[in-house]
Image (cartoon, rainbow, N blue to C red):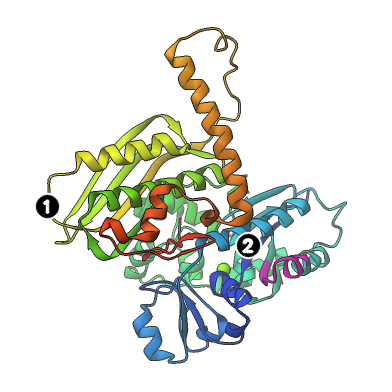
Amino acid sequence: MRPLVLHLDIDAFFASVEQLRNPRLAGRPVAVGSGVIASCSYEAREHGLQAGMPLGKALRQCPPLVIVRGHESIYRCYAARLFEICHNWSPVVEEHLDEAYCDLAGTERIYPDPRQEVARLRDEIHSSTGLTVTAGLGRNRMFARLIGKLHKPDGLGYIEPEQEESLLLQLPIESIPGVGPRTATVLSNLGIEKVEQLRELSRSALSGLLGRNGEILYERCRGEDHRLIGGREIPRSIQRGTSFDEDISCPRTLDAMIEYLAERIASNLRQRGLEAGGLALQLVHGDHRRDRRRVALAPPTALDPPIIKTALELRRAMEGRRTAIRFVGIHLDRIRLAATVEQGDLFTATTEDPADTDLQQQQRWKRLLGQVDRIRMRHGHGALLRGSALALQDGRDRGGTALERDRHGLILRTSCLTR
Ligand SMILES: [Mg+2]
């Protein structure tokens, strides 16, 4: 069986989506983010701008820059459409925020010429979403990604096994997956900058230096990457939070925001078929003091009511300081795939056991939220909001600042762009 992996990377993802949504931004330097650049268009990159750069500095360096606040849910819709196309085309797809890996091992009969097929796939993605992607084809994940990087943007790279060696040897060590900033510092302190130099270290030297990661690097710098293409990515944690234009001192406004964030994070869990086993609430006070409390969610859940209830209980338990609140965030952890098989309701119809009615109630919520999610998938999260969120939108009788709302929900001060 021919081992073959395809790596797809959406070019300047967030910025490209903004340019598609607003044609006046096409061809102009665009940055998405608040505080720092989360994504910027290739026109902005020509001015030396890149992700992670503070927006103030970016504006000084590139005065015509257009800065757009992020619209996370819209980006997810675009990515979902792209992943759907990949699933139609490849038996195994691993999805990331703006990247996908497809395992093409065993497809030599249906795709005798993979390069031609990938060109067709890229055309389909472009005509269906308007986005351009860069594709890399290689023997394993590492080579697929490395060769794609050399063909950005809007390119297609393919690496033959006999070209691997010459590509790998001249690369800086940071290009190797598994070499993060910390590992890079350890190695560069030893004068190791290139893969070629890394090769000179023995397996035992590398494992003595970096432990298990060192052994992996020993293989990677020789072109071996045994990571499989997985089904779905399960994040360790998911967070939603926002700061306020003015510090909040009204507990009802704070509770309304907590409800809104809890509802958003729960619907995100459900869309991805996940559930969470732990919840933490984080508050930052006006005097910069941080408070954080965490409890287990038992049983793990993706439903609004238990998540909202737990978050509000934590908020009440954290009461006691008289300072206003500057930031509130909800953090879910112990994430796992949601159980797909449900306990049957063999006895619930006849008994009056409170535990059974709990289960029934939960199933009613599940059905209701399933419908809510479907409406939101089609019309945006803002199409259906809780009453408390509408009060946030008003702002008037609550002593808070009124928040704007579009079809994607309330426009928060801190938009969440990452997982
Ligand atoms: Mg990208």
Label 1 environment density (alpha carbons within 10 Å; few <14, some 14–19, many ≥20):
few
Residue at the extreme front:
397
Q: Position of residue 130 (x, y in %)?
A: 70, 71
The magenta segment is 124-135
* Identity of the residue drawn at 52% across and 40% down: 274
Residue type for callout 1 = Arg
Q: Which mark is residue 78?
A: 2
Secondary element at image label 2: helix
Q: Is residue 14 left or right of residue 120?
A: left
Q: Which residue is mark 1?
A: 322
Q: Is residue 289 left or right of residue 306?
A: left
Residue type for callout 2 = Tyr
Residue toward you, 242 or 197 = 242
| Quadrant of the picture in which ligand 1 is shown | bottom right
Quarter of the picture holding the C terminus: bottom left
* Identity of the residue drawn at 77% across and 52% down: 88
Q: Is mark 1 within 8 Å of ligand 1?
A: no
Residue toward you, 26 or 182 = 26
Q: Quadrant of residue 160?
A: bottom right
Q: Is residue 112 above or below residue 11?
A: above
